[in-house]
C-alpha cells in the first residue's frame, strides 16, 4: 500500500464482513425496512419486540452470509477504471496498452475524461465508460489517481539505431527550430516529469503508448480544447521523428523525484487551450 | 370514339395528378412567425417556458438533438437506422439552421402531423407516431422553451438513405400503415393518474420507440406496444414493460419503477446502456407525481402470452457449468452474490433481472463486455461501477458466464452461444 488507504481501501475479495463496510449498513437498513412489515402482524408488544429482534438478527445474519460486503470507498466505486488501469493506476507497462494514470496531474486526468466525453479523444470503451460522469465525480477520480505513487515499470524498447536515439534526444531537449518544433522539455518540464496543473509527464511511459498518442493527434483520434498545441507539434513531426522521440523518451532514466513541476515554472512556446489560451492557435 | 378519347384524356390527367402529387405532394407554405396566431408575448411567458423546459426533459428532446460534445438541442449528428443515416436537425432558434423562422403552427405540424415546415413528410426517426398524442398546450410550452434557447448556428449533416427510402414520398405508404394522427384521448374507465401515465408513456415519453419490436419496414404494429424488442442498430434489448406474469418487469412494484426512473437503480435492476442515458437526461427530472403515474400505467399493462419455448438441440449443461466457474473466478460473485441477489442500493441482482433474462441475451452479454457505471443522477452522484470484461474474457468465456446467470436461481432463459458474443463484441458502442 502506498498512500494513506485504510484497510477498507483494498478490495474485499471474500464474502466475509469487513468492519468498515458502510455498504453493509445500507443492506441492514434495507432489511430493517422489510422487517417493519413483520412487526405489523403482531399485536402484542412483547411478542412483537422478541420477534423483531429475532427477525433482525436472522435476516442480518442470513443476508450477511449471502450478500457480499462492499466497502464504501472510491476505489470500490471505480472498478470500471481500475480493471484496466490498475487499482493504483499503474497501467500495463508490459504491454503498453492501458496507460499509467498514477501520479499524473489531476487537472490533466480530469481533462482527458472530459475529452472522451466530448468525443475529442476517441476510444469507444472509454467514451462509453465516462459518458455520464459529472465534472465533480471526474475531478474526484482524477485526484485519486493523481495521488497514487507506484513504481514505474520498464517497457520493451524497439531496436532503434544510435542515430535515431540521438535525433530523438535532440527533439526532447532542444526541439528542431528549423521546423518550428519546440522541445518536449519546454512544456513537459526539464526533467520531463510534467508540470502542474495540466501537463503530463512523459518519462517512464512505454514506447508504444507514446508513439500511438503522437500518431493519434495526427489522425484526429486524440485532441483537446482549442488551441490544441500538441496537435500542432505532432503534425510538424515526421513519421521517423515520432519513432525517434518515442524511443528517446522511453529509454530515459527516471529522475529520483517524479512529481510534476510547480505550476508556472515553464513558459509554453505555443498557445495551449488546456493551459487557458484562447483562439485557434495557428 | 369520342368517349374513348375522353377516357384516355381522363387517365392521362389522373396519372399526371398522381405523379405531381408524388413529387410535389404535401407542398405547403410555412406560416411566418408574424402571421402566427400565437403572439410573441405568449412565447416569452416565463411560466410557459418553464413548463416547456420540464416537458422537453420528459420527452428527452436533447437526447437525440445533441451531438457528442455539441451544444444542447443544436443537432449536428446523424441517427443510424437500418435504412440509412438520418440527420438530426438543430432545434435552437437559429434563423438559418434552426427553428428561428418557425411559427408555432409549423412546430405543431411537425410534432403532431409528422410534416416539415414546407409540408414535406418527415422520417419517423423523429417519433411523431408518439408525439402526435401530445396536447396542443404542452406543444406550445415546449415550443416557447425551444424558442427561448440561445441560438446556435449548426447546419445539419447530410442524409445517406438508401433507395427507395431516399424518396420522401415513399413515406406516404409508411404513414398509411403505421401512423394514426391524434391527441391522446383519456380512457374514462381509468383514473386520472392512469391516464396521465398513459399520456406520458405513449406520447411525449415515446417509450414505445425502443420498447417495442419493429417490423421489416421499421414500423410497430399496434398489438406489439411496449412488449419489448431489440433496438435497431444499437443492439440492445429494451425489455417488455408489463409487470404482469410473463412481462419483462414481472415482480416489479410501483416503487421499483419509480426508483429506477428517478435514481437509475431499484431493488430489481439498474438502468444501463441507452436507458442509463434516458434516466440521466430525462426521467430523473420528472416529478414524483408523474413518475407514479407512469408506474401505475405500466403496472396495468396486460401480460404477454409467450410462445412455448422450443427445446434446444444444444447441450447447455457443460456450458453452464463452465460459466459457474467463471462466475466465481472472475469475481462476479463478489458483487452480485452467490445467490445472484446483488447488494441492495449498490449492485443489481441478476436473479430475476429482466435484463438478464430478456429473450435475446444481448443485454447481459454486452453488460459483461462493457461494464460501466450505474446512471449518474442527483440521487446517486457517485455511482458504483462494473468492470468491463472485454479484455479479460474471450467469447467462449463470456458465453459461458452469461449462460450461467441466465440459467441459475429463478432464471430460466436460453443459453448464449460463442458466435453471439463475437457479434456483439463488434457492435459499435454508439
Image (tube, rainbow, N blue to C red):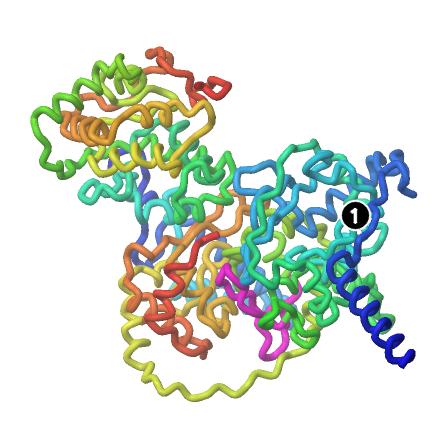
Image coords of residue A278 (percent x, y): 50, 18
Question: Based on the displayed image, in which of its 4 quarters is residue B122 positioned?
Answer: bottom right
Q: Nearer the viewer, residue B160 or A150?
A: B160
Residue at image x 30%, y 76%? Answer: B319
Residue B80 x %, y %: 54, 55
- Residue B230 covered by magenta stretch: yes
Residue drawn at x 46%, y 35% is A114
Image quadrant holding the N terminus of chain A, namely top left
Q: Is residue A20 visible?
A: no
> Is A239 displayed left or right of A166 in the figure?
right
Q: Quadrant of the C terminus of chain A?
A: top left
Residue B400 placement (x, y as % from top left): 32, 71
* Furthest residue in direction front, as rendered: B1
Q: What range is drawn magenta here?
A: B227-256
Task: Measuring from the top left, give residue B290's x and y in whole percent.
Answer: 73, 55
Q: Quadrant of residue B83?
A: bottom right
Please tell me how crowded label 1 is: few (under 14), some (14-19), or many (20+) other residues with Cα within 10 Å. Answer: many
Chain of the residue on which disc 1 is drawn: B
Q: Is residue B283 left or right of residue A248?
A: right
Predominant SS of the magenta segment: loop
In this picture, is B426 found above or below B191?
above
Q: Residue at x 69, y 52 (%)?
A: B59
Could you say which quadrant of the image residue A107 lies in?
A: top left
Q: Is residue A4 visible?
A: yes
Which residue lies at the image location 47% right of the left edge and 66% below the top edge? A59
In the rendered image, which residue does mark 1 sit on? B107
Residue B266 placement, left or right of A263 = right
Amino acid at each position: 500500500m502506498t498512500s494513506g488507504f485504510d484497510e477498507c481501501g483494498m478490495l474485499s475479495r471474500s464474502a466475509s464482513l469487513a468492519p468498515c463496510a458502510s455498504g453493509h449498513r445500507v443492506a441492514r437498513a434495507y432489511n430493517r425496512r422489510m422487517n417493519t412489515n413483520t412487526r405489523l402482524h403482531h399485536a402484542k408488544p412483547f411478542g412483537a419486540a422478541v420477534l423483531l429482534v429475532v427477525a433482525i438478527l436472522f435476516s442480518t445474519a442470513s443476508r450477511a452470509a449471502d450478500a457480499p460486503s462492499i466497502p464504501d470507498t472510491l476505489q470500490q466505486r471505480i472498478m470500471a477504471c481500475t480493471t484496466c488501469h490498475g487499482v493504483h493506476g499503474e497501467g500495463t507497462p508490459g504491454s503498453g496498452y492501458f496507460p499509467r494514470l498514477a501520479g499524473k496531474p489531476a487537472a490533466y486526468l480530469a481533462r482527458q475524461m472530459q475529452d472522451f466525453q466530448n468525443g475529442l479523444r476517441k476510444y469507444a470503451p472509454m467514451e462509453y465508460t465516462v459518458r455520464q460522469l459529472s465534472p465533480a465525480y471526474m475531478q474526484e477520480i482524477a485526484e485519486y489517481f493523481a495521488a497514487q505513487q507506484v513504481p514505474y515499470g520498464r517497457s520493451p524498447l524497439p531496436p532503434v539505431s544510435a542515430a535515431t536515439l540521438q535525433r530523438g534526444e535532440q527533439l526532447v531537449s532542444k526541439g528542431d527550430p528549423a521546423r518550428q518544433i519546440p522541445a518536449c522539455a519546454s512544456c513537459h518540464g526539464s526533467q520531463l516529469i510534467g508540470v502542474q496543473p495540466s501537463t503530463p509527464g512523459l518519462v517512464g511511459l512505454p514506447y508504444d503508448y507514446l508513439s500511438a498518442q503522437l500518431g493519434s493527434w495526427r489522425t484526429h483520434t486524440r485532441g483537446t480544447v482549442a488551441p490544441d498545441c500538441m496537435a500542432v507539434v505532432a503534425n510538424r513531426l515526421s513519421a521517423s521523428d515520432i519513432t525517434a522521440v518515442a524511443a528517446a523518451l522511453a529509454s530515459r532514466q527516471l529522475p529520483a523525484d517524479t512529481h510534476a513541476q510547480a505550476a508556472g515554472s515553464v513558459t509554453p512556446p505555443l498557445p495551449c487551450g488546456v493551459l487557458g489560451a484562447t483562439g485557434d492557435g495557428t | 370514339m369520342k368517349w374513348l378519347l375522353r377516357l384516355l384524356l381522363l387517365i392521362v390527367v389522373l396519372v399526371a395528378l398522381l405523379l405531381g402529387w408524388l413529387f410535389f405532394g404535401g407542398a405547403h407554405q410555412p406560416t411566418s412567425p408574424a402571421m402566427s396566431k400565437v403572439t410573441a408575448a405568449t412565447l416569452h411567458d416565463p411560466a410557459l417556458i418553464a413548463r416547456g423546459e420540464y416537458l422537453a426533459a420528459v420527452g428527452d428532446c436533447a437526447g437525440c438533438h445533441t451531438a457528442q460534445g455539441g451544444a444542447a438541442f443544436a443537432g449536428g449528428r446523424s441517427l443510424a437506422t437500418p435504412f440509412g443515416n438520418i440527420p438530426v436537425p438543430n432545434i435552437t432558434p437559429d434563423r438559418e439552421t434552426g427553428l428561428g423562422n418557425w411559427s408555432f403552427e409549423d412546430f405543431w405540424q411537425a410534432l403532431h402531423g409528422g410534416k416539415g415546415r414546407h409540408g414535406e413528410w418527415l422520417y419517423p426517426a423523429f417519433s411523431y407516431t408518439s408525439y402526435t398524442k401530445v396536447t396542443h398546450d404542452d406543444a406550445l410550452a415546449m415550443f416557447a422553451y425551444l424558442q427561448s434557447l440561445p441560438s446556435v448556428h449548426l447546419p445539419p449533416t447530410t442524409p445517406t438513405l438508401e433507395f427507395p427510402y431516399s424518396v420522401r414520398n415513399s413515406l406516404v405508404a409508411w404513414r398509411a400503415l403505421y401512423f394514426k394522427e391524434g391527441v391522446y384521448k383519456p380512457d374514462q374507465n381509468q383514473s386520472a393518474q392512469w391516464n396521465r401515465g398513459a399520456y406520458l408513456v405513449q406520447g411525449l415519453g415515446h417509450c414505445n420507440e425502443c420498447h417495442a419490436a419493429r417490423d421489416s419496414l421499421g414500423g410497430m404494429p399496434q398489438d406489439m406496444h411496449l412488449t419489448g424488442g431489440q433496438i435497431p442498430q444499437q443492439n440492445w434489448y429494451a425489455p417488455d414493460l408489463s409487470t404482469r406474469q410473463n412481462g419483462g418487469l414481472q415482480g416489479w412494484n410501483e416503487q421499483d419503477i419509480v426508483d429506477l426512473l428517478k435514481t437509475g437503480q431499484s431493488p430489481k435492476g439498474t438502468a444501463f446502456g441507452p436507458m442509463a442515458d434516458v434516466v440521466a437526461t430525462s426521467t430523473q427530472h420528472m416529478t414524483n407525481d408523474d413518475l407514479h403515474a407512469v408506474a401505475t400505467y405500466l403496472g396495468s399493462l396486460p401480460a404477454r402470452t409467450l410462445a412455448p419455448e422450443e427445446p434446444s438441440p444444444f447441450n447447455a449443461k457443460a456450458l453452464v457449468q463452465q460459466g459457474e466457474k467463471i462466475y466465481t473466478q472472475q469475481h462476479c460473485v463478489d458483487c452480485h452474490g452467490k445467490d445472484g441477489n446483488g447488494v441492495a442500493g449498490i449492485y443489481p441482482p441478476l436473479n430475476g433481472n429482466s435484463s438478464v433474462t430478456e429473450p435475446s441475451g444481448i443485454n447481459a452479454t454486452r453488460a459483461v463486455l462493457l461494464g460501466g457505471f450505474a446512471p449518474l443522477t442527483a440521487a446517486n452522484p457517485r455511482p458504483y461501477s462494473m468492470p468491463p470484461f472485454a479484455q479479460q474474457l474471450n467469447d467462449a468465456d463470456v458465453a459461458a458466464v452469461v449462460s450461467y446467470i441466465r440459467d441459475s436461481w429463478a432464471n430460466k432463459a436460453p443459453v448464449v452461444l460463442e458466435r453471439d458474443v463475437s457479434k456483439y463484441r463488434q457492435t459499435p458502442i454508439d
